[in-house]
Amino acid sequence: MDRSIGFASRIVGGVPLLLAFPPAGDAPRPMVLWFHGFGVDKEVHRKELEQLARAGFLAVGVDAAGHGARRLPDLDARQAAPHEQALRTMIGLAAQTADEVPSIVRALADEGLADAERVGVVGVSMGGYVVYQALLVEPSIRAAVAILGSPEWPEGDSPHRHLDSFGHTALLSITAERDENVLPAAARELHRRLATEHADAAQRYFELTGAVHLMSEEHWTQAMDETLRWLAHHLQPEP
């Protein structure tokens, strides 16, 4: 691991964070919040946080509500529940996590670590659900990447019903063609609607051919390459 990438744990507003600092450059830097999947925590994405930091971002791994350092005592049982019940739990925790985004952004910007005008979010699986919801609650987000998530929720105030909230953010959605857990159709339809109703919005839909939810290393490398290019294009200034 590149020793010039510094890691630091932090708690902001009760939310446990893992910060990865770029090896050089003055603060404030463009910031990317990274949201993990259901049942795991921010620590499983140290490699991706390092990649983001090496690319010049302040990378911030976030323990989702009910996960990691604030893990619910019955989370394993909730995750093992029948599909509809487990999905309801996951969506509830994703919504809580998205609601915390504004305070995280403000705190790190006020500390001088991050540029509040260059904020990005990335999420995988449950984290992808967080990303779609975060665009409804934090208008400062300039770039977003939802990987294996869905904007269409079976109940509650689903993000896909708020199309106007997606118009201000450069949104990349990455799905897996053969995903058995999160079907690609909802993200694909969101981008079709954006192309029709918000033709000037920066948006891209990318489907990994042949990939499943627990994708291969090759497919994950593709997803990360797309993610890093998208964030660099929309958050970093031209040389």
Image (cartoon, helix red, strand yellow):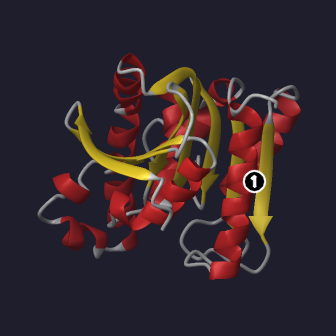
Horizontal side of 77 relative to 79 (left or right) equals left
Image coordinates for residue 64, horizontal then vertical, percent: 33, 50
Identify which residue, 116 or 130, lies in the foreground: 116
Could you tell whether 10 is left or right of 201 in the image? left
| Residue 215, quarter of picture | bottom right
Residue at the image point whose x is 55% and y is 40% from the top: 24
> Residue placed at 79% from the left, 75% from the top?
209
Q: Is 37 located above or below residue 92 in the figure?
A: below
Q: Is residue 130 visible?
A: yes
Q: Report the number of discs.
A: 1
Residue 147: x and y in percent read 61, 58
Q: Is residue 128 left or right of residue 211?
A: left
Q: At 28% from the left edge and 73% from the top edge, which residue is drawn? A: 81
Q: Position of residue 12 (x, y in %)?
A: 25, 33
Q: Position of residue 72 (x, y in %)?
A: 16, 58
**Within 10 angstroms of label 1, few (less than 14), some, or many (20 or more) residues?**
many
In the image: residue 9, left or right of residue 95:
left
- Report the front residue among 112 and 104: 112
Which part of the image, by quadrant, shows the C terminus? top right
Residue occupied by mark 1:
188
- Examine the rendered structure and indicate whether residue 146 appears above or below residue 162: below
Amino acid bearing label 1:
Arg
Q: Is residue 150 visible?
A: no
The kind of secondary structure element at disc 1 is helix
Residue occupying image coordinates x 11% and y 63%: 73
